[in-house]
Amino acid sequence: MIEMQEVYKKYPNGVSAINGIDVRINQGEFVYVVGPSGAGKSTFIKMMYREEVPTSGTITLNGVNVAKLKNTKVPQFRRQLGVVFQDFKLLPTLTVYENVAFALEVIEAQPKYIKKRVMEVLDLVNLKHKARMLPTELSGGEQQRVSIARSIVNSPKVVIADEPTGNLDPDTSWEIMKIFEEINNRGTTVVMATHNKEIVNTIKHRVIAIEGGKIARDEQRGEYGYEN
Amino acid sequence: MPVMNKEVNTVMKIRTLGRHARESLKSISRNGWMTFASVSAVTITLILVGVFVVIMMNLNRVAETIEEDVQIRVHIDVAATEQDQTALKDSIQNMPEVGSVKFSSKEEELNNLVKSMGEEGKAFKLFEQDNPLNDVFIVKTKKPTDTMDAAKKIEKLNFVSKVNYGEGKVEKLFKFIKASRNVGIVLIVGLFFTAIFLISNTIKITIIARRREIKIMRLVGATNGFIRWPFLLEGLWLGILGAVLPIILISIAYYRAYDYLGPKLQGTFIRVLPFDPFMYQVSGILLLMGALIGIWGSVMSVRKFLKV
């Protein structure tokens, strides 16, 4: 469960990105975060995985008060969620397998478990056969699937995705969405910031629209609601 | 669950240490020229440090042997009675700097003189009837460096005709040793920091090159300790690598020099420290300094760049 109460975020340069947000996302929900560029979507998402800290208010994720989290506790916290980015953020020198295994090595998991678990998630994203390839040898969609595999390898309760289809063509985007659906069906909360009108309007889920740092709309099975 | 994780964090698994070691070695080979530059900096620093240490330790040894020989010869005025002599001896003995006072009669002095002159000394035997020498107190100070002060004080006492302590020579030697020690220390400290600076720059470049990787590590929940380790190890390797050449060079040079100088210095007051164990000590010092420079250098840049 994710809960925000009276959250404000003002950057040191004086820009107020978030101007009072109250929201509650239950375990197992699938939520689209939409809104025009510069409306505060990114800040909203970043505060969830504690890349940004709110100026005031509380954010609770999996029972942890993220706003008050000490720096030394951040690693433990991050292990409980998965993050997916528009630009994949894969390590170019590591193979597909190694990229996914990396997330488990970092938390010092057992080698046996790493092997088993990595193959499991690669199977889920349909990339088992490309495990030995380097990211540069893959298409954009395949790279994003690797990054999704990495985000879920820790079995997180929450997956946060920041424009995961932003760099992909429509066909590939649908493939990626299928994987997120699958992850969500297994009980994982998915929070996804997106600009993709077709996706939001076709695969219906809760839509939170952010404008001017506030929640402008919050609808179950909502529409994208913007022209582009 | 959190308790278990804490244990995992405090006691690093050997497997993890292996991973850090591999990462650090990879980075060393990837950095190529910067690695070469920092290793050379450490090498040059340590060669100079090594040469300096070798010279200083030997100079100290020479100084020690000379110091042991430094004594004040107090010539007693011929007019002094036995009572005056005892009084003089007491007042010398009571000086805080003075360690021992030994009386040597003019007959003994003449004998010594004759002996030290060898064959030619026999001529001096003529003086046995009419000995022109004085009775002497041989004074040793507790600390050799106090010799000069003590000698000056003794000179002012009654019934002292002359004080002899190898004036000038002793002071010059002490001054020389002190000055060269200071110059050397300044030089080494300067080089030490240059090497640290270069190593920290190399590590900085490694960190910048791996910023993306570090960011991803953070995102998937790596602790700072986990991120830091490879960089610390890289610094350590650079430092140790830099110590290898100096140790080899200095050992060979010292071995040769000792072989060459040893026999020539026999019979003089100069003693050179023997290769074993001296060179092992020097090697240990150099290795330790290399490791220290390396770790220090990497700690500096890691601290600056990995603030979370």
Image: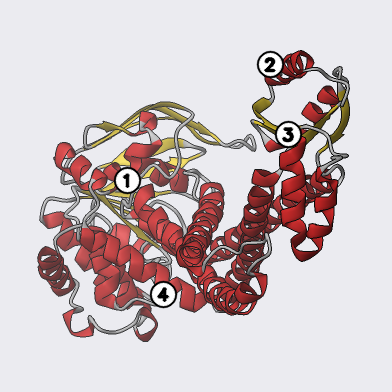
Total label count?
A: 4
Q: Is residue A138 left or right of residue B247?
A: left
In what element is the residue under mark 2?
loop
Q: Are marks 3 and 1 on the same chain?
A: no
Which residue matches tag 1? A75
User: Relative to A132, is B100 on the left or the right?
Assistant: right
Q: Nearer the viewer, mark 3 or mark 1?
A: 3
Report, in whole angstroms, how far the alpha carbon at label 4 lies from the one at label 1.
25 Å
Q: Residue at x 10, y 55 (%)?
A: A186
Answer above or below: position of B83 versus B132.
Answer: above
Q: Which chain is home to disc 1? A: A
Query: Mark 4 belongs to which amino acid?
Result: Lys
Q: Residue at x 25, y 44 (%)?
A: B10
Q: Secondary structure at mark 1?
A: helix
The amino acid sitting under disc 1 is Pro
Task: Tell me the tag on residue B94.
Answer: 2
Task: Please determine if labels 4 and 1 lie on a single subunit.
Answer: no
Q: Is residue B232 left or right of residue B168?
A: left
Q: How far separated are the C-alphas under marks 2 and 1?
A: 72 Å
Q: Residues within 10 Å of mark 4 (few under 14, many from 20)?
A: few
State whether residue B98 appears in this view: yes
Label annotation for residue B105: 3
Q: How far separated are the C-alphas under marks 2 and 4?
A: 70 Å
Any mark on residue A100, and which?
Answer: none
Q: Have a look at marks 2 and 3 and say if they share a chain.
A: yes
Residue holding disc 4: B26
Q: Residue A98's spot in the image, x, y percent?
A: 27, 73
Q: Chain of mark 3?
A: B
